[in-house]
Image: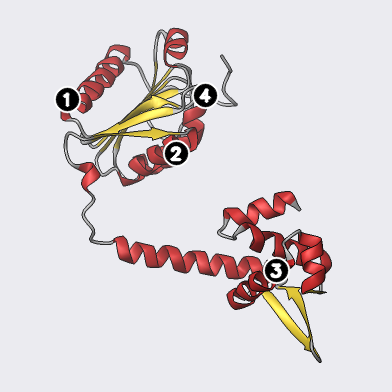
Amino acid sequence: MRKLTQSLMAVGFGEYEARTYAALLTLGQATGYQIAKESGVPRSAVYEVLTKLVTRGVVLTQAFADQVRYAPLPPDRFLSQMRREFDTSVETLAESLRGLVVTTGTPGTTWSLAGRRIILAYARQLIEQAAREVLLLVGDDDELDELRPVLEAAHARGCTVLVVTPTPYEMAGVPMRVHPAGQALRQTLGHGLTLVVDQREALLGETDQSETAVWTTNRYAIAWARWSMQHEAASMGGSPSRRTGKRSRR
């Protein structure tokens, strides 16, 4: 029940709400007293929590004389309802955001990111929004496993895409360059990346150990990162690398 409670809290339930709904899934049908006993939610609070869940539509009620019994919305209907609510919320948010001016992209600004998941999510977004060019240098091909779909999609829609990697890697149609000092590059950069998009944004950082990165629109930093990658790629020459199978670990 603990894992279920945590999952419910992750999608917006309060702790008492999550514990109450989880308890109802175990009990099937129950009175407020039984739910409080099973969930550990205080009796003084459980009826207020149940009222909120009834209003939300995830708990059903049934009255017998002066007694009220509660039942959970079946899991399949609950999930369907949650998906509809989420989609509606996202669409509402999208409508609200359209047309707003975002100042973080002002030339010369730099922002910090933390967490591997956040860094790679931001990298995916930058690549998805690329209109002309994507240059990427990675220290290990773990990052390529994560970014491969958006890189291939960028190439397919006509962006110039170039990837420099320490080890051979196959990616549909995307020009790849294997660094001649691949092992040294891997040891130096670790699980990190340098990404430059459309000559206007750059993301640099490591996705292991500190799991920190910077996103910048500083023109000098972008020009230097872009020139360095192009210089490295030009010095390698050759044809795009290809490989099959999974990567090797360092």
| Labels 2 and 1: the sequence-earlier one | 2
Q: Which residue is painted at 58% across and 53% down in the image? A: 10
Where residue 4 appears, as percent x and y from the top left, is 71, 54
Q: Which residue is painted at 64% across and 72% down in the image? A: 48
Name the front one of labels 2 and 3: 3
Q: CA distance from mark 3 to mark 1?
A: 62 Å
Residue 220's tag is 1
Residue 221 image-quadrant placement: top left
Q: Secondary structure at mark 2?
A: helix
Q: How many numbered dots are placed on residues in this image?
A: 4
Q: Secondary structure at mark 4?
A: loop
Q: Which residue is mark 2?
A: 118
Question: Looking at the image, is 163 positioned above or below residue 33?
Answer: above
Q: CA distance from mark 2 to mark 1?
A: 25 Å
| Labels 3 and 1: the sequence-earlier one | 3
Left or right: where 230 falls relative to 139 = left
Mark 4 in CB contact with mark 3 (< 8 angstroms): no
| Labels 4 and 3: the sequence-earlier one | 3
Mark 3 in CB contact with mark 1 (< 8 angstroms): no
Mark 1 in CB contact with mark 4 (< 8 angstroms): no
Name the front one of labels 2 and 4: 2
Residue 44's tag is 3
Residue 243's tag is 4
